[in-house]
Image (spheres, grey):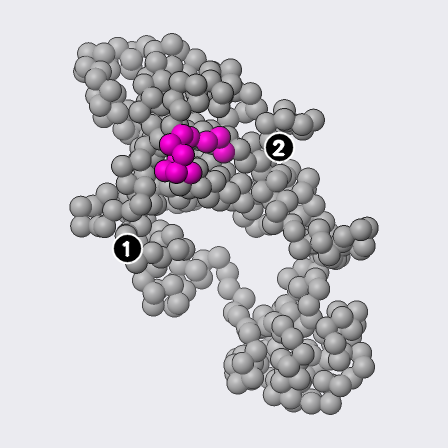
Amino acid sequence: MSESLRPGPLSGLTVITLEHAIAAPFCTRQLADLGARVIKVERPGTGDFARAYDHRTRGLASHFVWTNRSKESLTLDLKQPAAQEVLAELIAQADVLVQNLAPGAAARMGLSWDTLHAKYPRLIVCDISGYGDDGPYRDKKAYDLLIQSEAGFLSVTGTPDEPSKAGNSIADIAAGMYAYTGILSALLQRNLAGTGSHVEVSMLEALGEWMGFPMYYAYDGQQAPGRNGAAHATIYPYGPFKAGDGKVVMLGLQNEREWKVFCDIVLQRPELAADPRFDANVRRVENRAVLKEVIEACFSGITAEDVIARLDQARIANAAVNQVGDLWTHPQLHARQRFRSIDSPAGPLQALLPPATVDSFDARMDAVPALGEHSEQILRELGRSDAEIRQLQTDGVI
């Protein structure tokens, strides 16, 4: 981290992570953002398999670039005793261990919470899995799409005719964020109690929490929210509407006051506010198909720009229907200077600052590591000589 940056609150802490894919790497990148030293242990030759997901970011994998900046890469073949010895030395000096290996893999390597806590009472151990450490689903494989399905997310996402997955790894992201906040909580607890904690996060439970609204909406066997494409399932009008020039405007109403203003200024049909089909949100939802026709008929003679102008005049929430690439040039993000240049094996890349800006420290925005880039440096820190390091390379340990 540059000496000109104000160090973050996790500076001086060391995180060892046995991670792959998204959930754990997303968690540990947040810790690195706050200044923690994150040592990512990878398999020699191949590394985290997310490195090979695609080659879209100047030859690097998009998922990997997103979730692995500011980390150090150490390659270890953990099937070999010499590698296990290195890992043990690192864990002995660490503050946090994170792993999202296959179910039972960490325990078989002697890295269960019970074993590690007995040796290192201050160590925080975070286990991320698909379904948790026990229960009938404990040993099931879990990938993001499968958890989206298992958690009922697909049942409320998509169109009436076809369910759709989220366009990003929402189950992994949910699990990674709860692991991140769980570790922060455990660090605070360690300051109070002096001992480490076991943080356990399952992808199913993380996404289950995010399904809270539809779960309560369907409480006691009531009908669940339907799939309504880009429109809100239980508030209307709230979603995309086509203007006369064929462009789509996204808008959203939240209350009856806004409905009256919307009818008066935007639709320029104030009488609709009292129409018994539309005079309360529950009736607008029931009659959404008819109301959509009414709204788009009102918009049919004007452009999307005109619609937005009316919405802004009425102070009705609205948004552009952007494409993914538009985020790289979004005027609001650039006005707030949210992009930074980070290094990578492919050269400089642009990256978004972490969403939470804290005025007392600077977010760490260091390089995306090449596979094994820091192996020799870390081994020298552990006291290995150049000759010993060369032997470990010859033996395929690193």
Q: Quadrant of the C terminus?
A: top left
Q: Give left or right: position of 223 versus 232.
A: right
Residue lying at 60% horizontally and 31% vertically, measured from the top left: 132
Q: Nearer the viewer, residue 159 or 215?
A: 215
Tag 2 residue: 131
Q: Residue furthest front?
A: 193
Residue lying at 52% horizontally and 69% vertically, measured from the top left: 320
192 in the magenta segment: yes
Can residue 148 be seen from the camera position used here? yes
- The quadrant where residue 202 appears: top right
- The residues colored magenta run 189-199
Q: In the image, residue 350 lies at what x, y percent?
A: 33, 52
Regarding mark 2 in the picture, which secondary structure is present there? Answer: loop
Q: In the image, residue 245 lies at what x, y percent?
A: 59, 78
User: How many residues crowd around disc 1 within 10 Å: few (fewer than 14), some, or many (20 or more)?
Assistant: few
- Of pointers 2 and 1, the one earlier in the residue sequence: 2
Tag 1 residue: 360
Residue lying at 76% horizontally and 52% vertically, measured from the top left: 219
